[in-house]
Each structure stands twice: as C-alpha cells, then as structure tokens.
Amino acid sequence: QVTLKESGPGILQPSQTLSLTCSFSGFSLSTSGMGVGWIRQPSGKGLEWLAHIWWDDVKRYNPALKSRLTISKDTSSSQVFLKIASVDTADTATYYCARIPFYDGYPYFDYWGQGTTLTVSS
Amino acid sequence: DIQMTQTTSSLSASLGDRVTISCSASQGISNYLNWYQQKPDGTVKLLIYYTSSLHSGVPSRFSGSGSGTDYSLTISNLEPEDIATYYCQQYSKLPWTFGGGTKLEIK
C-alpha cells in the first residue's frame, strides 16, 4: 500500500525559508524508474508543478522558481525534502508530494499525499 | 512553457449523464497527457495517463482521448462520487504544466 504524507511549518514570515518533508511508504526511491515530485495549489486555484527527484538523484525544477528551490532525498528513511527560499505571500498554498513511476516511459503522479498548508504572513 | 487550457471552468450535469471535459495545449504534446480528479476535501487521484490509459482501480466509465493539441476526458453514466474538479497535465516538455481545472457539479 503506497502512502505519502507531507509535513511543514504551517506558517512562515516573509523572507524565511520553507522546509517541507514528504514521508512515504509502500515503495522505495532506490528502485529504478521511481521518482517523487512536489506540486502546490493556492487556495481556490489550480495546480503547479514545482520539482521532482528521481531514483538516481536526477533533479528537475520549475524554472519559474528554480533559483529558490532545492529538492533532496533520504532513501534510507523514505523521505523527500523541498526547500523554498525567501518565501512571500504568493507562496501561500497547499503543498502536495506525489509518487512518479517511470517504468514504461510515461511519467505520471499516481499517488498523492493529503497536502500540507502553508500561510505566509507578517 | 506549454500552456494547458481547460476552457470550461465549471460544468453542471445530471446523474447518469455522459460528460466530456476538454483540454487544449498551446503546442502539440504527442499524447503525453494525464488526467487527475480532485475531490472537495483536496484528495487528488490519477485517472488517465498517456491520453487514454486507465489507471489501476479507476472505474471504466472514465475514458480519455485526443491527439495533437486537443484532448478530452469523458465520464459516462455520471455518479454522485464523480463530483470533483478535473485537471489535465502535460509532460511533453518541462516544466510539466496543468490545466486550470474543470469543476463538475450535479444539477
């Protein structure tokens, strides 16, 4: 059974760094073809892909935020991390992590966490 | 970036109806398109990958089609649990991008 769960600070002040953790079970990020990604959604708005990391530590970032994003993983503890530097009110959103299997050449987010909400406010 | 447009932001239909949700890409995406369902509580599920492949466990009343720049998700025989917002997503080129969503409501 695949599960993912996001955790984060809940609230931050502008200019602080956001640290998010995705804890997962039911699969391993050491498996060839496996990845985990981060997606966010401002309240009442659509989904935005932020970044993902593959089993071989290849990382991909959304260019719109690339200078502020850092994704990493700890395979042994089944966790993926995302840091967003210098947050501002526009970063207020629900943040999801999701598994990305890429065995057959068709990547997709097949299992999602429940999301963690971030509010940026002074 | 490839822009994904779901021109219908909300749609109202009756139980048992056949519903089609459309998604258009700003350039050809070679069928590299997925569909997701987001329930009102925020839960997100994969429905369709690679335009028309049904994800495991998804009811067969969901189907996908399309090519080039134009894609669609069809729900036949609408059921109450289908009330949700539906998003398309392209993975032809980075950055992966989502459509703005189509909210499906019951008449």
Image (cartoon, coloured by chain):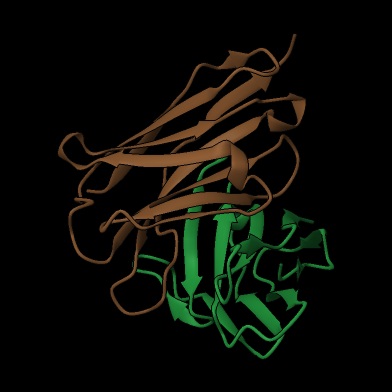
Chain colours: A brown, B green
Please indicate whether residue B64 sits to the left or right of residue B100 in the image. left
Name the residue at 62% across, 14% down. A12
Location of residue A36 with respect to B62 vertically, above or below: above
B103 w.r.t. B34: above or below: above
- Residue B72 visible here: yes
| Whether residue B41 is visible | no
Of A121 and B66, nearer the camera is A121
Residue A89 in the image: state x and y as whole percent.
75, 25
Q: Name the foreground residue: A79 vs B78.
A: A79
User: What residue appears at the point 60 percent right and 14 percent down from the top-left corner?
Assistant: A11
Which quarter of the rendered picture does the C terminus of chain A lie within? Answer: top right
Residue B102 image position (x, y, % from top left): 74, 59
**B94, B97: nearer the viewer:** B94
As drawn, the residue found furthest toward the bottom would be: B67
Q: How many marks?
A: 0
- Relative horizontal placement of residue A60, taking residue B66 as reference (left or right): left
Seen at 58% across and 26% down, the residue is: A117
**Placement of B50 over or under A8, stated as above or below:** below
